[in-house]
C-alpha cells in the first residue's frame, strides 16, 4: 500500500521512499538540486534556496540492514528521475511486467498486471462496458460486451449477464437450474434458517401472493400481475425465465434476435424465405428440386461462361490463313449456346494471331446431377462441312471436357486454357474460357435496354423467382416434327405475362407510339434485343424451348424462345398471333436449317410485307412475318422477311 509523507514530498511504496509529484513539480519550478552541505543532519532536512525559490525537503530515512541512509538528489539525478518517471508512465500495459505490478492505469483499483492476467483492459475501468467498473464486476472480462447491467439483464447486479454468464441470478447460493425463485430478493443466502427446503425461495421474504408458481419479484420483472394467478408470465420453453427476459425462448441454442423461428426449437433459419424453416423444408432453396435429390441445397445452380481468347495454330484452309471461327457450349450434351451471338455469324481470325472474343453465356445446370459434363467445342465454318478445331490436350477428343462439381459454392470461378497442342492430331487451336458459379434464384439483370426508331429505351422490372422455378421445372421435351409441342410454351394468359405486356404497352404510348402497329413494333424491338444464343443444327443435341419467364429471367434465348416470348406478349394485349416453323437459308450457297418465327395480325394494316394467311376461320386474315431473333433499328420491321429462301413452313395458331 502506498503512503505519503505529511508534507506531501515523499511516497513510501514497498518500503522505499520515492519523490512525489509535489517534489517533482517543485524542482521543475526552480528548486536547486541538493548536496551534502545543504543537509541538516539533526533534523534530516534538505534546504534549497536560489533563483527566487526557496524550499526545504525533509529527508526520509531508508533503513537497510539497520543502517540509516540519506536520500540526496543531485541535479543530474533529478533530471534522470523525472525523465524515467515520464517515460515509464507513458509505456503501455504489458510492456514491463514490474511496472504493471505497481501501476493502475485506469484507476479502477486493480493493477495493470492483475487486469492483464484476468483478461480485462488495463486502460478501461469498465472493460465490458456494462456499467460496472472492473473492481465491482464479477465478470469483468465480459463474455457479452456493450450491454447494460440492470434489473432485467443482471438481477443481482454482479456484472454477469443472467442469460449467458450467471448461473445464480439472485446470488443466493442456489444455481438457477435448481432455484424456484432465481430472481428473489438480492442480499440473502439460502441456508437452513432462511430456506429450509433449499428451493432457492426465501421462507419468509419471497412471496408468491397469487400462488401461480412465480414469485412476486419475478412477476414484476416479467411485467405480469403478482396478485392475479391468471396473469402468469409467458414461458415458452418452461425454463422459469419468462419470454420478455429470455433471450432464447425456444431453448434451441440460438438468440431470439437471430432466430427466425424463436418459438420453434426445430428451426431457426429459412434460406429461401418461404416461411418454412430449413430443418422442416424439403426444398431449402426453393428451386423445385427436393433436397434429397438436390446436389446443392442452397442455390439454383447456374454458370456464366465466357469465351475470352482464341489462337489458331493450324491453317484450316489450303488456300488462305483466314478461319471462320464459331464455338459452342454443351451441358450434358445439350447445346447451351454458340458464339458469335447471331446465327450464321463467325469470327474471322488469322492463324497465329491472339484474338479477344468476349462472348458470354448464362447457363442453367441440372441440380440433380452431382457432376455435370461441360464441353466447349470450336469449328471452322465451311461451305460443305464444318471442320472441328482441336482444343483438347487429349487425342481422344477435339472438344474440351470439364466435369463441373454442382455442389460448388456460389461465387466460385475458374479460368481454363483449352489447348490442342501436343497430342499430335487434329487442327490445333487454343481457347481461354472462364466461368463462375451463380444462383439462378437471382434474376440475371432487371434492367432491359433496347433501341427503337433512333432512341434508346430502358425498363427496370423484377420478376418473381417462384414463376421462374415453376415453369423451369416443367417438362421441356418437344417433337421436332410437331409444332404444337413448341407452341405450348407460349403462355399469354399467365399473370406475369399480362402485367409485363401492359407495362411495355404503357411505355410505348407514353413515348408517342399509340397505333396498333407502333405498339407491336415497339414490343418487337424489346424482344429482338434480348441476347440470342444459337443452337447449331445437325449437332445431334436435344432442343430446349423456353417459357417466356425463362427467357426474361435469363435474358437469353434462341429462335423459338424469342418467337414464343413475342407471341405471348402480343397475345396478352389482344393481338392475334401464330407460331411458324420451317427451313431457311441465308443465301443460295447456304444449307437449309430449321428455324422458328412469329406471325402477327395488325388490325387495319394490309400491306406491311411478307405474310401468311390464317388457319380455319381466319383463312382470309393476314399474319405478318416477325423475325423475333434479332431487331436492328432502321432495318427490322414487322413484315420484313430477312431470309434468302424459306421452305416446308408449318403454322400454329396460339390462343
Image (cartoon, grey):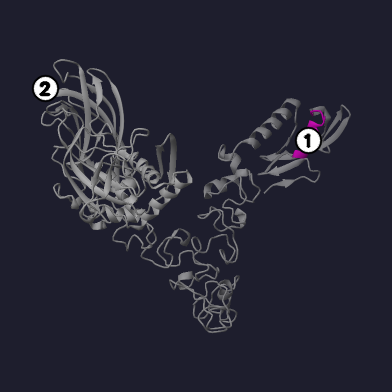
For residue 625, the mark is none
Q: Quadrant of the C terminus?
A: bottom left
Q: Residue at x 35, y 38 (%)?
A: 529
Magenta residues? 21-34
Q: Quadrant of residue 318?
A: top left
Q: Is residue 496 left or right of residue 107?
A: left
Q: Which residue is mark 1?
A: 25
- Graded by Cα atoms within 10 Å as few (under 14), some (14 to 19) or many (20 or more), the crowding at tag 2 reads few
Sequence-first disc among 2 and 1: 1
Secondary structure found at label 2:
loop
Q: Which residue is mark 2?
A: 424
Q: Residue at x 17, y 23 (%)?
A: 428
Seen from the viewer's position, the closer of residues 472 and 6 is 472
Seen from the viewer's position, the closer of residues 393 and 381 is 381
Seen from the viewer's position, the closer of residues 521 and 382 is 521
Mark 2 to mark 1 CA distance (whole Å):
92 Å
Q: Is residue 263 above or below residue 573?
A: below
Q: Is residue 352 left or right of residue 527?
A: left
- Graded by Cα atoms within 10 Å as few (under 14), some (14 to 19) or many (20 or more), the crowding at tag 1 reads few
Q: Is residue 484 above or below residue 531?
A: below
Amino acid at each position: 500500500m502506498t503512503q505519503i509523507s505529511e508534507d506531501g514530498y515523499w511516497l513510501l511504496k514497498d518500503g522505499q521512499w520515492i519523490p512525489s509529484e509535489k517534489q517533482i513539480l517543485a524542482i521543475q519550478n526552480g528548486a536547486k538540486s541538493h548536496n551534502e552541505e545543504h543537509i541538516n543532519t539533526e533534523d534530516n532536512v534538505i534546504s534549497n534556496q536560489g533563483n527566487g525559490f526557496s524550499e526545504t525537503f525533509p529527508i526520509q530515512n531508508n533503513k537497510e540492514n539497520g543502517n540509516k541512509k540519506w536520500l540526496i538528489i543531485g541535479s543530474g539525478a533529478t533530471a534522470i528521475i523525472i525523465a524515467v518517471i515520464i517515460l515509464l508512465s507513458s509505456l503501455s500495459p504489458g510492456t514491463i511486467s514490474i511496472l504493471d505490478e505497481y501501476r493502475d492505469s485506469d484507476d479502477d483499483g486493480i493493477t495493470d498486471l492483475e487486469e492483464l492476467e484476468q483478461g480485462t483492459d488495463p486502460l478501461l475501468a469498465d472493460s465490458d462496458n456494462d456499467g460496472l467498473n472492473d473492481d465491482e464486476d464479477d465478470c469483468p472480462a465480459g463474455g457479452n460486451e456493450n450491454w447494460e447491467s440492470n434489473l432485467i439483464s443482471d438481477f443481482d447486479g454482479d456484472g454477469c449477464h443472467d442469460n449467458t454468464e450467471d448461473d445464480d441470478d439472485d446470488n443466493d447460493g442456489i444455481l438457477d437450474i435448481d432455484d424456484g425463485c432465481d430472481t428473489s430478493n438480492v442480499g440473502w443466502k439460502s441456508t437452513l434458517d432462511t430456506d429450509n427446503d433449499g428451493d432457492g425461495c426465501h421462507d419468509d421474504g419471497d412471496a408468491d401472493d397469487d400462488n401461480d408458481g412465480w414469485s412476486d419479484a419475478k412477476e414484476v420483472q416479467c411485467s405480469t400481475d403478482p396478485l392475479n394467478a391468471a396473469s402468469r408470465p409467458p414461458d415458452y420453453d418452461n425454463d422459469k425465465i419468462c419470454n420478455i427476459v429470455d433471450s432464447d425462448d425456444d431453448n434451441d441454442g440460438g438468440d431470439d434476435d437471430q432466430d427466425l423461428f424463436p418459438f420453434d426449437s426445430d428451426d431457426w433459419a429459412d434460406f429461401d424465405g418461404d416461411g418454412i424453416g430449413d430443418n422442416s423444408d424439403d426444398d431449402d432453396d426453393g428451386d423445385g428440386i427436393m433436397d434429397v435429390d438436390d446436389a446443392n441445397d442452397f442455390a439454383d445452380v447456374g454458370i456464366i461462361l465466357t469465351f475470352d481468347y482464341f489462337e489458331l495454330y493450324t491453317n484450316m484452309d489450303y488456300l488462305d490463313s483466314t478461319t471462320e471461327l464459331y464455338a459452342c457450349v454443351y451441358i450434358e450434351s445439350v447445346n447451351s449456346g454458340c458464339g458469335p451471338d447471331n446465327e450464321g455469324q463467325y469470327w474471322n481470325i488469322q492463324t497465329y494471331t491472339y484474338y479477344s472474343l468476349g462472348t458470354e453465356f448464362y447457363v442453367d445446370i441440372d441440380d440433380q446431377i452431382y457432376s455435370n459434363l461441360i464441353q466447349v467445342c470450336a469449328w471452322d465454318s465451311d461451305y460443305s462441312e464444318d471442320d472441328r478445331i482441336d482444343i483438347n490436350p487429349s487425342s481422344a477428343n477435339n472438344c474440351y471436357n470439364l466435369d463441373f462439381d454442382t455442389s460448388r459454392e456460389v461465387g466460385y470461378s475458374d479460368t481454363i486454357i483449352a489447348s490442342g497442342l501436343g497430342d499430335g492430331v487434329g487442327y490445333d487451336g487454343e481457347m481461354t474460357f472462364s466461368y463462375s458459379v451463380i444462383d439462378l434464384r437471382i434474376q440475371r439483370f432487371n434492367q432491359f435496354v433496347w433501341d427503337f426508331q433512333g432512341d434508346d429505351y430502358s425498363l427496370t422490372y423484377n420478376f418473381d423467382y417462384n414463376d421462374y422455378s415453376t415453369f423451369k421445372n416443367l417438362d421441356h421435351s418437344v417433337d421436332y416434327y410437331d409444332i404444337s409441342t413448341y407452341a405450348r410454351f407460349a403462355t399469354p394468359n399467365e399473370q406475369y405475362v399480362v402485367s409485363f405486356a401492359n407495362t411495355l404497352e404503357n411505355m410505348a404510348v407514353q413515348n408517342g407510339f399509340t397505333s396498333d402497329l407502333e405498339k407491336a413494333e415497339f414490343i418487337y424491338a424489346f424482344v429482338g434485343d434480348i441476347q440470342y444464343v444459337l443452337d447449331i443444327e445437325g449437332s445431334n443435341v436435344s432442343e430446349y424451348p423456353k417459357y417466356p419467364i425463362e427467357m426474361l429471367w435469363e435474358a437469353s434465348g434462341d429462335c423459338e424462345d424469342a418467337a414464343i416470348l413475342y407471341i405471348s406478349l402480343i397475345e396478352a394485349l389482344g393481338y392475334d398471333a401464330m407460331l411458324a416453323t420451317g427451313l431457311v437459308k441465308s443465301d443460295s450457297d447456304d444449307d437449309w436449317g430449321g428455324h422458328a418465327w412469329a406471325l402477327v395480325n395488325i388490325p387495319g394494316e394490309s400491306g406491311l410485307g411478307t405474310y401468311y394467311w390464317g388457319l380455319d376461320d381466319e383463312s382470309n386474315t393476314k399474319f405478318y412475318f416477325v423475325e423475333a431473333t434479332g431487331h436492328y433499328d432502321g432495318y427490322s420491321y414487322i413484315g420484313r422477311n430477312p431470309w434468302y429462301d424459306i421452305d416446308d413452313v408449318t403454322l400454329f395458331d396460339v390462343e
